[in-house]
Amino acid sequence: MDVTIDTVSPARVHALDHLERVRKDDAFVDKLTIEDADARTRRQARELVAGVTRQRRWLDFVLGEAYHGDYDSMEHRLQEILRLGLYELLFQSTPTHAAVDEYVELAKQALRPGAGNLVNGVLRTIDRDREHIPTPDTGDDANDLALRYSHPTWMVQRWLDRFGLDETTELLRANNRRPMYSVRINPLRTSEADVAAWLDEHDVVNVDSPYLDRYLRLKRLQALIAGDLLDDGHVAVQDESAGLVVQLLDPQPGDTLIDGCAAPGGKAMHAAARMEGTGTIYAVDRDEQRLERVETAAEAQGASEMVEAETADLRAWAARPEPPQGDRVLLDVPCTGMGVLAKRAGLRWRRSMEDLEEMAELQDELLDAAAQLVRPGGLLVYSTCTTEPEENERRVEAFLARHDGFGVESADGHVPDEMVSDAGFLATFPHRHRMDGAFAARLRRDEA
């Protein structure tokens, strides 16, 4: 793009470039890489890209109402510039003159002078009447909510049927909220007191997790990324929902643990800490590059002596002659990720109803493979980062129908009561618990 950087904010230029790549090349919103830019520019560009992607449907509704023409047929780059400008006005409280003037200039340089005039007119029209921005009123509750809170209509309809209007609205708001991050303190490398001292020294605002020991909540991770806590393995970024899955697994010192879909290794490393550095963890994953991250994490976090990483599809690994058997087997399966929409801004636009059926087939196959690896009397924990019954409760029901040697053990006593479903499963939700949506079931194999 032929844009003069010294007259337009570099973060805005980079954000426009990446949004174009997302559209043209199906690039991932979360994989924004910017070379030759300072940390502040990178952070601002990432926030703009994630925010515009997350709020895209609502932004397009507002822009379409304000534009005197066929907004849907507008050239894509001009739409992206308008989305960026409107996002700053509505969600970042950027002063009107700063946002409008910059995006007018960006439109002029990236497109032509007339495009700048259009951007100026549309954004200032919305800004002048922002107290009376239209409310979607299509006559369909699911579609209206989907427009207002920028989700696919099919998702919203599912949640309305399941949760009702008020709770669905809260879930949609939670998915659009800037995500809270959490980190786990690694007792194999450090102490809570030492981590607290480091955070205080670097002015990192944090609070203790209300649900888990050795977990802290933070609004930003920049200081940790720039510092040495992560590289030295003293802390690890891990959502509390993932920590609760490991708590449900309850690995013990000396156990043999098989992690069947291990990469990138967060749960395996948490398990290693709970095992106090003793025992064996087989970390199996079919993605060799992602499995390397498990080995890197094990080295950094003091667990390399415990971890045996193997690149393999679990279905093939379990079918080998006399595979290892675990005291505990963790199966954190690939899923639609509909519990992590706040952190993965573009994921909501990549999912469809068909994905639920496709994922279920894979999940069943992986469960059948994992069942072969549980020793008699051992434990299998099935987990996902989705909120959808087709991938959660129904997969467990189908598994039990195929495997009468397994039974459900309640999550009671392992995780907070408010996260235990009526059927005894772990279930977390973004709008209820301020963490990712997740599910897990304890499945005990009979002794004989």
Image: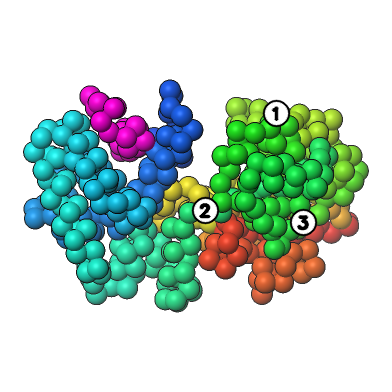
Residue 286 appearing in the image = no
Q: Quadrant of residue 114?
A: top left
Q: Position of residue 128 (x, y in %)?
A: 18, 61
Q: Quadrant of residue 90?
A: bottom left
Mark earlier in primary sequence (3, 1)? 3
Q: Could you say which disc has been placed on residue 371 in the image? A: none
Q: Nearer the viewer, mark 3 or mark 1?
A: 3
Are the residues at dot 3 and dot 1 in contact (C-beta closer than 8 Å)?
no
Q: Could you say which disc has been placed on residue 179 in the image? A: 2
Q: Position of residue 6 (x, y in %)?
A: 29, 27
Pointer 1 local density, CA inside 10 Å: few below 14, some 14–19, many at least 20: some
Residue 133 part of the magenta segment: no
The secondary structure making up most of the magenta span is helix
Which amino acid is tagged 3?
A: Asp
- Horizontal side of residue 248 vs 57, given as left or right: right
Q: Residue under circle 1?
A: 296
Mark earlier in primary sequence (2, 3)? 2
Q: Could you say which disc has been placed on residue 213 in the image? A: 3
Helix, strand or loop for disc 1: helix
Are the residues at dot 1 and dot 2 in contact (C-beta closer than 8 Å)?
no
Over which residues does the magenta segment extend? 1-26
Which amino acid is tagged 1?
A: Thr
Total marks shown come to 3
Quadrant (top left/top right/bottom left/bottom right) for the C terminus: bottom right
Can you say whether 429 is above or below 328 in the image?
A: below
Which residue shows up at 46% across the image and 36% down it?
40
Q: Nearer the viewer, residue 99 or 297?
A: 99
